[in-house]
Image: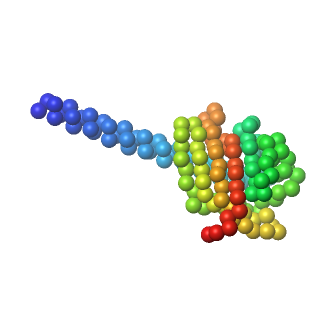
Amino acid sequence: MKSLKILILLLFISCNIGIAQNENLDISKQEVLNAQSLRISAMIDADIDKLNDLLTDDLTYAHTTGWTETKTGYLETIKSGKINYISFVPKDIEIRIYGETAVLTGKVDVNLGRTDFTIRFLEVQHKVDGIWKLTAWQSVLNKVD
């Protein structure tokens, strides 16, 4: 009987740990989405200071054309208006979290004013000093919906 009580107690504890881990994962996923949303707003507003804070120093940003930039180059592109995002709307996002690193995949409807298109993306965020920051972006044109 004592063994049964211990077994039930251990089962109860392990279930609660599993629930707590799932809740923590959900919180982390929401934090990642919030960071993505803040970054997109900063891109659209060309808020270089805010954008600077949301990118890792070793950022690699690969556009749909294959053109690849560092953090410094990407910030200059946004600041100069070379790329002027009117809207940038993510959808069908999937998030996988591995410790302090998050991998996101999905689609984005992009409006640059003169053109609209949909891309598929791979985004990597890394948590630095408690803040999720973009460390890598890769996108391709979405030819099929």
Residue 89 or residue 92, whichever sits in front: 92
Q: Quadrant of the C terminus?
A: bottom right
Q: Which residue is farthest left?
A: 1
Q: Which residue is farthest top?
A: 2
Which residue shows up at 21% across the image and 37% down it?
A: 8
Residue 4 figure quarter: top left
Locate residue 72, reporting x and y percent: 82, 41
In this view of the protein, can residue 91 be seen by the observer? yes
Residue 41 figure quarter: bottom right
Decide if residue 16 is on the left or right side of residue 124: left
Locate residue 1, reporting x and y percent: 11, 33
In this view of the protein, can residue 44 be seen by the observer? no
Decide if residue 78 is on the left or right side of residue 7: right
Decide if residue 89 is on the left or right side of residue 22: right
Q: Which residue is farthest right?
A: 80
Locate residue 137, reporting x and y percent: 70, 49
Q: Is residue 145 above or below residue 99?
A: below
What sort of colour scheme is used for the picture?
rainbow
Which residue shows up at 37% across the image and 41% down it?
A: 18
Which residue shows up at 69% across the image and 45% down it?
A: 136
Decide if residue 144 is on the left or right side of residue 25: right
Which residue shows up at 61% across the image and 37% down it?
A: 127
Labels in figure, total: 0
